[in-house]
Amino acid sequence: MPKISVELSDEELARVNERAQSLGVSTRSWAKQTLVQDADRARFLTAARTALPTALEAVKDAPEGMR
C-alpha cells in the first residue's frame, strides 16, 4: 500500500498528536481521514461549481419564488 511521508516540526507534530488524541484516534488514522476528507470536499465543490450554471439555466424562467 502506498504511503505518504510528511516532515513536521516538533511543535507541529505535538499539535497534530494532541488533536488526534482529543478525537480518540491514532495520529495516522486522523491524518488519513483528514487528507481524504479534504480531497473529497474539493472534488464535491468543483462538481457543484460546474453544475450551478446548468441548474440556474434550468430554472431561469421559473417564477421568482420558485428559483
Image (tube, grey):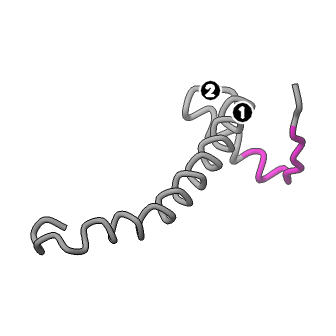
- The kind of residue tagged 2 is Val
Does residue 5 belong to the magenta stretch? yes
* Total labels drawn: 2
Few, some or many residues within 10 Å of mark 1 (<14, 14–19, 20+): some
For mark 2, what is the residue?
Answer: 25
Q: SS of the residue at dot 2? A: loop
- The kind of residue tagged 1 is Thr
Which image quarter holds the C terminus? Answer: bottom left
For mark 1, what is the residue?
Answer: 27
Q: Residue at x 78, y 53 (%)?
A: 11
Q: Residue at x 51, y 64 (%)?
A: 50
**Closer to the camera in the image, 8 or 52:** 52
Give the percent coordinates (x, y) of residue 44: 53, 52
Question: Which corner quadrant of the image does residue 9 belong to?
Answer: bottom right
Instruction: Tell me: 15 left or right of 43.
Output: right
Q: State if disc 2 and disc 1 touch (CB < 8 Å).
A: yes
Instruction: Tell me: 63 left or right of 67.
Output: left
Establish if 1 lies above or below 49: above
Q: Residue at x 90, y 42 (%)?
A: 5
Question: Which corner quadrant of the image does residue 2 belong to?
Answer: top right
**Closer to the camera in the image, 60 or 23:** 60
Instruction: Tell me: 30 left or right of 22.
Output: right
Q: Residue at x 12, y 75 (%)?
A: 64
CA distance separating discs 1 and 2: 7 Å
**Closer to the camera in the image, 60 or 42:** 60
Give the percent coordinates (x, y) of residue 55: 35, 63
Which image quarter holds the N terminus? Answer: top right
Disc on res. 13: none
Establish if 53 lies above or below 8: below
Q: Which residues make up the magenta segment? A: 4-14
